[in-house]
Image (cartoon, helix red, strand yellow):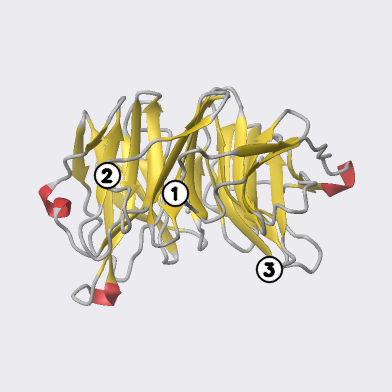
Amino acid sequence: MHNLHRSAIAGLAIAVLALCLPTMPATGAMRSPVTAKGWHLVQTISEGSSFVSLQDLVALSPKDAWVVGSYGSSPRSHALTARWNGRSWSKVRVADSQVKAIDVVAMSSRGDTWAFGYGANGQYLLNWTGRTWSVQRATGASNILVSAAIVFNRHDVWIFGSNLVPGYGSYAVHFNGHAWKAMPIPGISAEGFPVAAAAATSPRSIWVASNEYPATSRILHWNGRWSVAALPSRVAHMRYLEFAGLASAPSGSVWASGWQNGPSDPGGFAPVLLQLHRSTWRYLPVGPCYGCQTAFVAPDGGGGAWAQTNQSFVLHFRGDRWHKVRAPNMNDLTHIPGTTSMWGFSLAGQIYAYGSAGT
């Protein structure tokens, strides 16, 4: 999600800042136009003349979704969040001015919502109370880059990312409702193995992707302990491979996306897309797609998946093969549970939809 700062996490101290964070008044509501079937623009989120940068979007249902990011230029940027209520997107203010930007947002199936951002004083963890954002400052995590989060419930939250000092390394912590605990990932906790993405099918089945560039990147699995997943031979020893996305479907299927970067590839990039099918990872060739980077992937609600590209199209996996579908240039894609509709967004503030989303 992608669509993704660090330190010694052991003994991560959380200082809770009890703040009242009001929602924007009704005049801040952003109405959505009538939708079409294909990918189309629903709304542009703006903040006066300030530059808007969207970073992540999550959906719980056709009537509940969040998008996060920032507006303004550093060092005077501000966190931005907006919520979809089934009719319109409305901005929700983060009153703590120390939170400069939000990179990741995640929800449980019951709507418990967490967001993860940063500011001049380090990393911030935000929890939606139903009325406001409560803010916690991760006082020991000033050099953390959060790339992914998984929320099962308010007593079971995972954060993944990268340690930036003295070099990129993995970052994984778990919240049990009372305290955060470091969860080292054997084999990738040293420099050179940042966690790029994460997804889960249950609390006992979590998948993470880590990158060691230019050496072989890998996918790991948590079922109470960490293990390295067996990938298809085409991918298992692939050099210059970078994973960027992982996404799970209610069926138990998991999708992975990334690309191979190397001078031997036409256009410099070659897409790499995988599916976990019946406990086995399989490689899903795209066909000619010169220069394609497939950074993010999401299930489509019908047994297939959508994959974002850096081209003027997205990829839709149906009928056991990928199809190119013309679409705007989007940064990430999100499936709307219980439907075959999708949300997408660009970094510059545009929110797109596919199917009935946005109506």
Q: Position of residue 327 (x, y in %)?
A: 48, 59
Give the number of the disc on residue 74: 3
Q: Is residue 221 visible?
A: yes
Identify residue for label 2: 219
Q: Are marks 2 and 1 in contact (CB under 8 Å)?
A: no
Q: Residue at x 39, y 51 (%)?
A: 196
Who is closer to the viewer here, 274 or 170?
A: 170
- Report which quarter residue 317 is drawn in: top left
The crowd level at tag 2 (other Cα within 10 Å; few <14, some 14-19, many 20+) is: many
Real-space CA distance between mark 2 and mark 3, rounded to the nearest whole angstrom: 34 Å
Real-space CA distance between mark 1 and mark 3, rounded to the nearest whole angstrom: 22 Å
Q: Is residue 319 visible?
A: no
Q: Which of marks 2 and 3 is nearer the N terminus?
A: 3
> Helix, strand, or loop for circle 3?
loop
Q: Where is residue 207 in the image (x, y as percent from the top left)?
A: 33, 37
Identify residue for label 1: 161
Q: Residue at x 75, y 66 (%)?
A: 76
Give the number of the disc on residue 62: none
Who is closer to the viewer here, 347 or 356?
A: 347
Left or right: where does residue 314 sit relative to residue 23?
left
Q: Position of residue 248 (x, y in %)?
A: 38, 35
Q: Earlier in the sequence, mark 1 or mark 3?
A: 3
Q: Earlier in the sequence, mark 2 or mark 1?
A: 1
- Report which quarter residue 303 is drawn in: top left
Q: Position of residue 151 (x, y in %)?
A: 51, 31
Which residue extends farthest left? 233
Label 2 vs label 3, nearer the camera: 3
The crowd level at tag 1 (other Cα within 10 Å; few <14, some 14-19, many 20+) is: many
Real-space CA distance between mark 2 and mark 1, rounded to the nearest whole angstrom: 14 Å
